[in-house]
Each structure stands twice: as C-alpha cells, then as structure tokens.
Amino acid sequence: MKSHWNRRQVLRQAALAGAASALGTLPARPLLAASPNEKLNIAVVGCGGRGGDDLSGVSSENIVALCDVDDRRAARAYKAHPKARRFRDFRKMLDAVGREIEAVVVGTPDHTHAPPAVAAMKMGKHCYCEKPLAHSVYEVRTMREIAQQKKLATQMGTQIHAEPNYRRVVELIQSGAIGPVGEVHVWFGGSYAGKDRPKETPPVPPELDWDLWLGPAPTRPYHPCYLPGAWRRWWDFGCGALGDFGCHYMDLPFWALGLRYPTSVEAEGPPVHPEGTPGWLTIRYEFPARGALPPVRLTWYDGGKRPAQVQQGKVPNWGSAVLFVGQKGMLLADYGRRKLLPEAQFAGFQAPKPTIPDSIGHHREWIAACKTGSPTTCNFDYSGALAEAVVLGNVAYRCGKKLLWDAASLKATGCPEADPYIRPEYRQGWG
C-alpha cells in the first residue's frame, strides 16, 4: 500500500485503469492514493448531520464531490465546498468522478451505508463509513470482505475510539489490573421506541428526493416523522438504540478483550413491533475463549435497564457505561472516566505506563492510511466483527429466541426464520 508516486503517476494509473475497464479487464490493484504530502481526492455521500461532521473531519483534503438527497440538509456543505461537484444519486456520482477520486466517506442513514460503500470499494476506493457500518449482518460482512480483498484503507466512524480514556482502559484490562475478565455489562441510558406507521401522506418537500432517500428499503409514502434523525426508530431504516450506541460502548470490551464473533445471542424486550424499534432491550452475548483468555458473557442494556451490580449499589449508576468484572475486581468506564472497584481495594493503585500511542485523530488516521498504508484502529476487519455482533442483537430480539451463531456460514443454526433479518431483501433495482 505504500506509495512514493507523484500525482502525475497516480493520474496516469487512473487513466490506465479506465482503459483496462473499457477493454473488459480490471486493474490488478486498487488505485494508489496520493503521497503523504499531497491531498487526497475524496467524495462524500451524506453531507448533513453526522455526515457533515465527517466532511469537516476530512476537509483538509481535496473534496471532489458531494452527494446528498436533501438539498436543504446539504446546504452548509455546498457553501463550504463550492468547487465540489454536486450529486443526489451516488451511482451517478461514481460514474462521473470514479476515475478522479481515491476515497469515499459515507455518512448516510444506516440503511444506505452499504450500497455506496460497496460500490465504491469494488472500484478500489478507500472507505470511511459511519457506525454501525451497515444495516444488516450480511451487509457488514460483505463490506469487510471487499475491503480485505481490495486491500483498502478503511475506518468505521466510532470517533470515541481515538480518545485517550479508551486507551487507558484497555491498558488496565490487558495489564491484569482486575484479573481475567469473564463478564462485561454495557448500558446506554437512552431509548428509541418506535411506533405505528403514520396514515397521513403529506407532500414531499421539493428539496428532498424521497425515492433516493429510501434507497434499498421498501417503498412507503413520505412523512416527516422519518427524517432527519428519527429514522433510527424504524426497522426499515435504522437499528434503534443498540445500532446507534452499541458500536461506541461495546468497542471497549471488543478492544480490551480481543472479542470477535459470539457463539450465541439472546434478547429480551417489549413485544416486537413490526415497524418500530423497541423502547428497551437486554441482550446476552456469549463469546468463546481466546487462547489463554476465558469465555466472556457480555450483556447489553438500554432504555433504563441496568445490571444487578448497579441496582444493588455496588457500582455507581452512570448514565451510560461499561463494567468489566474480573477475578480481582471491577473496572467501570464511560467516554471520559474510569474507576477501579471496590475503591478501597484499589487505594494507592499505580496504573501501568501507557503503551498504546495517542491517536492523531480518527479521521486523520484514515487519511494517513489512504496515503501511506499505515494502520487504522477501527478498520473494517476489527469494526466489522463489532458491528456484526451489534446488529445481530436485533436479529435475536426480532426472532424471539436464542440464536446459536455460526459466524463462518453467517447462519443462526436451526433458526431459518432469522435469515430475512440477517440478509433483508433489497427493493428492486438496488440489489
């Protein structure tokens, strides 16, 4: 992946790749990015909200194209980057500027993460994509495999991963401060309860292309209850509270304990609604031993639910947090805090010297990787396993039974009713 080519050589390779494509052959390797001192050519899909923040994170580079289905939401991005070409349909964007760009950033709603990311990566473009990486388990696995096959620089948008506190927590766990860890509790204080589909059919705002916003999701009439932001509460578009914050908080145990794929997933919550996500969930994941590390039971809670340790007053009731339970004690952490428990037991404890270097910045890591082949800490191999587990929790809830997970075949053993949730059908024209 390392490149010492200048811009002229890079563009020449792009021209050769285009010629090869026209002849019905493909280049043997993805388009090489700029040298470390040159700007990266980037296209951004989804320019408002979280996508707008991602655009700001890569704005030091050359923003070639902006794609958004909502002109009003994208107005600030258009104003900040007047030279960038504007598109509503990412497919037309890739057709128009595919030979020019080297990387894409995807910051759309969950259900439209995979289509532009997969299309761009198949063209050999490096990819930064927001969490939870994709809307379904199958989409997540597909994105991870394409990135691996194409040897692309990737990063999932779990920005808190780059903050120092997470690094110090990982060092504490891996140094053995609380002994071997076999139990983890992760909770998020919020709730994303869905509801029935509205019966009203107001007109689509002129600045919005509703059909493109729906993307691969089933057709339904426009209603302002879906966007912006509220799409997270609807199964066709989002993944509820678990999808929004699971990748942020479960990132800590995945990183610290080297977790990958669960062997079983079981969920409880209110009665399943066919349209809307639940107001609360409790999900129990079982992970196997990893070498000398013991098996781990990880439990997720949202909508106000808490582990027994909090309910019994043994652990402070932080709004959202991660609790590691080890053989020698416990460690409680959130985005910016960490606490060893019981406090009296750890009085005078000396933390290990930092061993994990500070990040240069979550977006900057990815930019550097595109240019030099340096590693990213939330590449699609690592974050793909994390995201698969997160969205698999919703599959277990919607199926209403414990899933025995065969990660190699992407199947819930003996549970064919899980298949439509693992790999939902795309609307015609999007598959």
Image (cartoon, grey):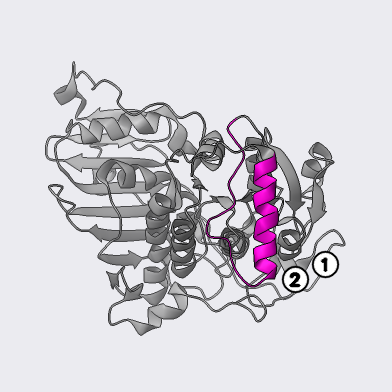
The span picked out in magenta is 8-36
Front-most of residues 18 and 189: 18
Q: Residue at x 24, y 43 (%)?
A: 309
Q: Position of residue 93 (x, y in %)?
A: 75, 59
Q: Position of residue 351 (x, y in %)?
A: 24, 21
Q: Is residue 371 left or right of residue 351?
A: right
Q: Is residue 376 left or right of residue 287?
A: right
Residue 10 is covered by the magenta coloring: yes
Q: Residue at x 79, y 37 (%)?
A: 80
In the displayed structure, 12 sits above or below 430; it is above
Kind of residue indicated by mark 2: Asp
Kind of residue indicated by mark 1: Val
Residue that protrudes farthest toward the right in the picture: 206
Q: Residue at x 17, y 34 (%)?
A: 178
Label 2 SS: helix
Residue that numbered label 2 is attached to: 211
Marks 1 and 2, how far apart at CA: 10 Å
In the displayed structure, 62 sits above or below 190; it is above
Residue that numbered label 1 is attached to: 204
Residue 142 visible:
yes
Q: Position of residue 86 (x, y in %)?
A: 81, 52
